[in-house]
Amino acid sequence: MKTLEDYVVSIPDFPEDGIIFRDITTVVQDPEGLKLAIDTMMGFLDGVDFDMVVGPEARGFIFGMPIAYNTGKGFITIRKKGKLPRETVEQEYDLEYGKATIEIHKDAIRPGQKIVIVDDLLATGGTMEANIRLVESLGGTVVKVIFLIELAGLKGRERLADYSVDSAIIYDGK
């Protein structure tokens, strides 16, 4: 029986020398890989009381939506600035070479709602930290953060130490 790691293709020296790119397209294009990924990530929710699932653009949509569906919860999107049609709140955060801004609809989360955030990758934790701040700015409580892949060498989990974090696959390096 294949493990989830068996579905991930590791590509050395992409996008630059010394980096190993973990390609998840091979996970989601294979029916068994996709099912294993979703089932594994859903397993992290056993015993967790929550109201809504949030998925950041774009790969958080891929994994968050089926988890919301399978648990009978609603799904909320966090998008890049300018992509949402109604009134939004925004959060700016630092990138390696610049800044980015993400947004959520102002009415997406009610104060006190318990939120699970689902995304594909935990690296440095900066992007997820911005997602969490955005949810909390609307009064939501983040009760769980779930990733498909974690690059432990980048220490993103340390940045999210105040939250319950689980990753389906953990790679030691960067």
Image (spheres, rainbow, N blue to C red):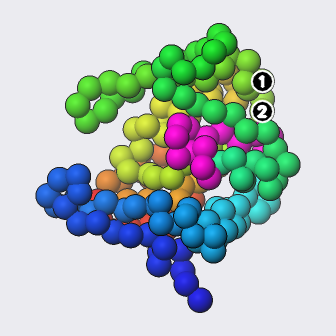
Give, as a three-letter code, the residue at label 2: Gln
* Quadrant for the N terminus in the image: bottom right
Question: Can residue 162 be seen at all in this image of the molecule?
Answer: no
- Residue at 47% x, 78% y is 6
Q: How far apart are marks 2 and 1 (CA)?
A: 6 Å
Classify 10 Å Cα crowding around label 1: few (below 14), some (14-19), many (20 and above). few
Q: Left of 72 or right of it: where is 129?
A: left
Mark number for residue 113?
2
Q: Is 42 contained in the magenta span?
A: no
Mark 2 is surrounded, within 10 Å at the Cα level, by few (under 14), some (14 to 19) or many (20 or more) other residues, namely: some
| The C terminus sits in image quarter | bottom left
Q: For this rendering, which residue is in front, 71 or 6?
A: 6
Image position of 145 (left or right of 173): right
- Residue lying at 81% horizontally and 44% vertically, measured from the top left: 73
- Look at the numbered disc 2 and give the secondary structure of its residue: loop
List the residue tagged with mark 1.
Answer: 110
Residue 170 falls in image quadrant:
bottom left
Q: What residue type is labelled 1?
A: Arg
Magenta residues, as a range?
A: 49-63
